[in-house]
Image (spheres, rainbow, N blue to C red):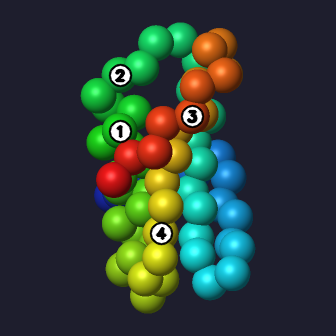
Amino acid sequence: MRGQDALRPDRVVFINGSVHVLDFKTGTAKETHKQQIKRYGKLYQQMGYEKVRTQLVYLDTNEVVEVA
């Protein structure tokens, strides 16, 4: 992509008409993580997917955060 950063979520899973976008993180939660996963979700919505769930997975704490 010329002049733009490529968007690459860590994992995208298609289940029963829904798209689940996951991004794996280490360390502590940061607001930038939420901003990043929201961009990924918006991209899939722009591609025509209506049911998009975005989740951050923190590997150090085994925590999964749903981001709306």
Q: Mark 1 points at which residue?
A: 34
Distance between mark 3 and mark 1 Cα atoms: 12 Å
Q: Which of marks 3 and 4 is nearer the N terminus?
A: 4
The residue that mark 3 highlights is: 64
- Disc 1 packing (10 Å; few <14; some 14–19; many ≥20): some
The reply to whether the C-beta atoms of the residues labelled 3 and 2 are less than 8 Å apart is no
Cα distance between the residues tagged 1 and 4: 15 Å
Disc 2 element: loop
Find numbered disc 1 in the image and state the secondary structure of the residue it sits on.
helix
Q: Position of residue 22 (x, y in %)?
A: 59, 48
Q: Mark 2 points at which residue?
A: 30
Kind of residue at disc 3? Val
Question: CB atoms at circles 2 and 1 under 8 Å apart?
Answer: yes
Assess disc 2: are there few (<14), some (14-19) or many (≥20) residues with their C-alpha within 10 Å of its C-alpha.
Answer: few
Please report the residue visible at 43 percent of the width from the left and 82 percent of the height from the top. Answer: 50
C-alpha separation, residue under disc 3 versus residue under disc 4:
16 Å
Question: In the rendering, at what x and y percent does residue 36 appear?
Answer: 38, 43
Disc 2 from disc 1: Cα separation: 7 Å
Q: What element carries label 4?
A: strand
**Residue that badge 4 annotates:** 52
Dot 1 amino acid type: Lys
Which amino acid does the dot numbered 4 rest on?
Val
* Point 58% across, 25% down: residue: 63
Q: Are marks 3 and 4 in contact (CB under 8 Å)?
A: no
Mark with earlier residue (1, 4): 1
Q: Say if 36 sits above or below 48 in the image.
A: above
Q: Which residue is drawn at 47% across and 76% down?
A: 51
Where residue 27 appears, as percent x and y from the top left, is: 53, 11
User: Closest to the observer: 53 or 48?
Assistant: 53
Q: In which quarter of the image is the N terminus?
A: bottom left
